[in-house]
Image: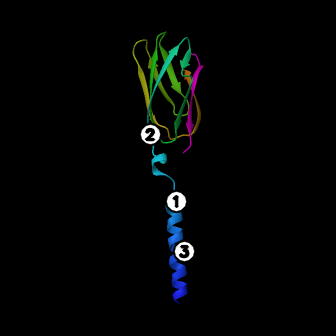
Amino acid sequence: MNRTLVVVVLVLIVLGALFFVLRPDPASEASREQNIDLSIEDSAMTPNEVEVGEGDRVTLKITTSGAPTKVHLHGYDLQREVAPGEPATLSFEADLTGRFEIEDHETDKLLGVLLVQPR
């Protein structure tokens, strides 16, 4: 009986230690606040590719020095009018993973891409 009790206690200690060693780091799983500046000139966005993590709270601050542009973020179905000298913002939680096009909604020209990586 004592031997069985000792084995059970040892197994519980080993399992407890494995749990603490192998569990995911909660800090790496936490969502982050992502504030990203985008600039549109001559129908091109800089940077042309933006990468965030799933669950991040994202704010895209978009400016243009050229003609007014209606920016559309596919997948999240968000759009904003961007006038020269008047920054526009798109704020959302990145709850969909994948590759999403950012386009000029009036001309359907691809401006750039949002990549949402799974956690």
Cα distance between the residues tagged 1 and 3: 15 Å
Q: Nearer the viewer, residue 119 or 73?
A: 119
Q: Residue at x 49, y 18 (%)?
A: 39
Write down the region rendered in magenta.
106-119
Cα distance between the residues tagged 1 and 2: 24 Å
Which of pointers 1 and 2 lies earlier in the amino acid sequence? Answer: 1
**Residue underneath mark 1:** 21
Q: Residue at x 53, y 79 (%)?
A: 8
Main SS, magenta residues: strand
Cα distance between the residues tagged 3 and 2: 38 Å
Q: Residue furthest left?
A: 86
Q: Nearer the viewer, residue 112 or 83?
A: 112
Q: Amino acid at mark 3?
A: Val
Q: Residue at x 54, y 40 (%)?
A: 96
**Badge 2: few (under 14), some or many (20 or more) residues near its Cα, within 10 Å?**
some
Q: Position of residue 102 (x, y in %)?
A: 55, 25
Q: Residue at x 51, y 54 (%)?
A: 24
Mark 1 element type: helix
**Residue underneath mark 3:** 11
Q: Nearer the viewer, residue 57 or 32?
A: 32
Q: Amino acid at mark 1?
A: Val
Q: Nearer the viewer, residue 8 or 117?
A: 8
Q: Nearer the viewer, mark 1 or mark 2?
A: 1
Instruction: Give above or below for 88 relative to 95.
Output: above
Q: Amino acid at mark 2?
A: Arg
Which of pointers 3 and 2 lies earlier in the amino acid sequence? Answer: 3
Mark 3 element type: helix
Q: Position of residue 111 (x, y in %)?
A: 57, 20
61 relative position to 54: left or right = left
**Residue underneath mark 2:** 32
**Badge 1: few (under 14), some or many (20 or more) residues near its Cα, within 10 Å?**
few
